Amino acid sequence: WDETHFGKMGSYYINRTFFFDVHPPLGKMLIGLAGYLSGYDGTFPFQKPGDRYEQHNYMGMRGFCAFLGSCLVPFAYLTVLELSKSLPAALLTAFILIFDTGCITLSQYILLDPILMFFLMGAVLSMVKCNSCADRPFSASWWFWLSLTGVNLAGAMGVKFVGLFVVLLVGLNTIYDLWDLLGNLSLSLVMFGKHLMARVLCLIVLPLALYTAMFAVHFAVLNKSGPGDGFFSSAFQSQLIGNNLHNVSIPEHLAYGSVITMKNLRMAGGYLHSHWHLYPEGVGARQQQVTAYLHKDLNNLWIIKKHDSDTADLSDPLSPVEFVRHGDIIRLEHKETSRNLHSHQHEAPLTRKHFQVTGYGINGTGDSNDFWRIEVVGRKTGKLIKVLRSQIRLIHVATGCILGSSGKTLPKWGWEQVEVTCTPYLKETPNSLWNFEDHINPKLPNISLDVLKPSFAEILLESHMVMIRVGFTSKPWHWPINYQGLRFSGVNETDYRVYLLGNPVIWWLNLVTMGLYLLITVCTAVALKRGVQLTYELKELSRVVLRGGGQITLGWLLHYLPFFMMGRVLYFHHYFPAMLFSSMLTGITWDSLLKFCAGFLSPSTTARKVYGGGFLALVLLILYSFYLFHPLSYGMIGPMASDPSSPMAGLRWMDSWEF
């Protein structure tokens, strides 16, 4: 399953090969570091699930992820212990996470999830510990836990962007604390300012500094050309050893008569390209095809000309150089076929309401539909145009449309290249922006591309823009009910099959507990509002339920509800951070409920028996369910569960389970 992605990315770090991924780099860097320190040489190809590792040393990477996954148990135990001050509640939470088949499966392979959940739970534990030091602010322990919260926030954000949800949780907790301090009239405004600055320093400045440092290391390590080059701008690629733009010298400013290539700025947008083949009958005008092509090719070369004169005189080495400026009207002649870049009001092949773009004319002679106005984003009329750095758009003079790449793949007649259109919608998107990459002009002095090298801040911004643009799926409502798992490996009887599915008893217990917690919270809130006299023990219980349980419930909501608004592909494993919160809530809720029930019984021996019996019943239920479902985590072989002779046959409680 995803080991083919993240194991391969670990190899890229060891080999220093640049790649692209939609997640920030920390998780993959740590996987690569674990492999490197444990003797893995980065040579396993990671092509498909089920491939044997043979002599390759993969245990360090798996062991690292398993260790971080194992840390979830003590983290959750300590968090619940701090919130509830109840050992049984903390133990019940620990039992739930130890014996959940889903957590085991997700933690024992080379995946980002255990790393993300490690930092997430670390942040929650640090936040709760810091809250418990509120009575001794600015003490060594208070600073330690506050700083550690910031470090863990940077870690969570550095592994996956969903780490933003725990940042939100800590942020809301901090706002609540500061609001509470503001209402404390014994606290001077100077002291309140110190509290505010301490939180800004530890929870904003420190995480941002660490997050930025991760990218600095990421770009420093991945300095060789690799499969991720094409996602990034030409200027970015020029830094990568082995890329065709690395250490080359080209003229800096665009001039008439120059031979150029144009790269579209949408992710994997391709180079402006043409070839001898015509559009087929019935697809706009039967003229020469213009496409976007993802690879370097001679058919990507164009000559830049004035709109009202030929460039024959410009090729004369004695003629003066004339630079292209922002606002000029130009023609682009395809070097290989001598046809001009052309558009008209015929509809584009695939994108409705866009105009067709073609190659037209003979030996550079065409008509007024070959005229384009060149504009540089953010520049004034008359300014020179820089190769690589200037983002330009070409506006068709006759129709007012903008040249762009739609990102759609043409059929076989278009060689499955990317459609180029002229869009009448003037919205500025990466699809309609281009930059000049190759630039050949013998009359101009060459400069090293190092002069055009982007700054670290520009690289950081570009990498985030690319990550944000990218992005059998499952639906978020499926997840808490354990509706459908994920095949990790194997599909046939002879395969060793691992299936990601939560322990059904635990997950359904968590789901029931959500409803139960809501009921208890409403009853407690009503009782307190009506001024019902509670004993000291019941007051403490109500505090744990409302304050401790409330924090955990907020964590669950923040890590679950946003997925309903996401447009990206979603998988079952996205629910696991939320599952950690629901498991902690189960520990707190059942402990409080059993204590509440025992509180109404006398003598105390009966109360203890009821409390102990209830706790023991829950633990035994969890243990037995783990005994039934453990093959899901540790691997199944033999007949499929649909076969009555399979040991798993009676355990397919839902038809949607595919083990």
Image: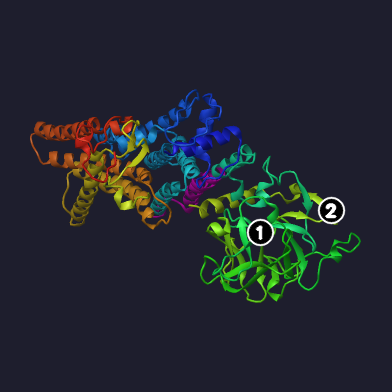
Question: Within the magenta stretch, is there residue 58?
Answer: no
Q: Quadrant of the N terminus?
A: top left
Mark 1 vs 2, N-terminal side: 1
Name the amino acid type tagged 2: Pro
| Location of mark 2 (residue) | 445
In terms of secondary structure, where does tag 1 sit? Answer: strand
Frontmost residue, 218 versus 74: 218
Name the amino acid type tagged 1: His
Secondary structure character of the magenta stretch overall: helix
The boundaries of the magenta stretch are: 182-209
Q: Kindly identify the residue that appears in the image at 53 percent across and 41 percent down.
A: 25
Furthest residue to the right? 318
12 left or right of 627? right
Frontmost residue, 215 versus 337: 337
Q: Mark 1 and 2 residues: CB-CB less than 8 Å, in contact?
A: no
Mark seen at residue 275: 1
Q: Nearer the viewer, mark 1 or mark 2?
A: 1
In terms of secondary structure, where does tag 2 sit? Answer: loop
Q: Please say if 467 is above or below 312.
A: above
Q: Please say if 299 is above or below 57.
A: below
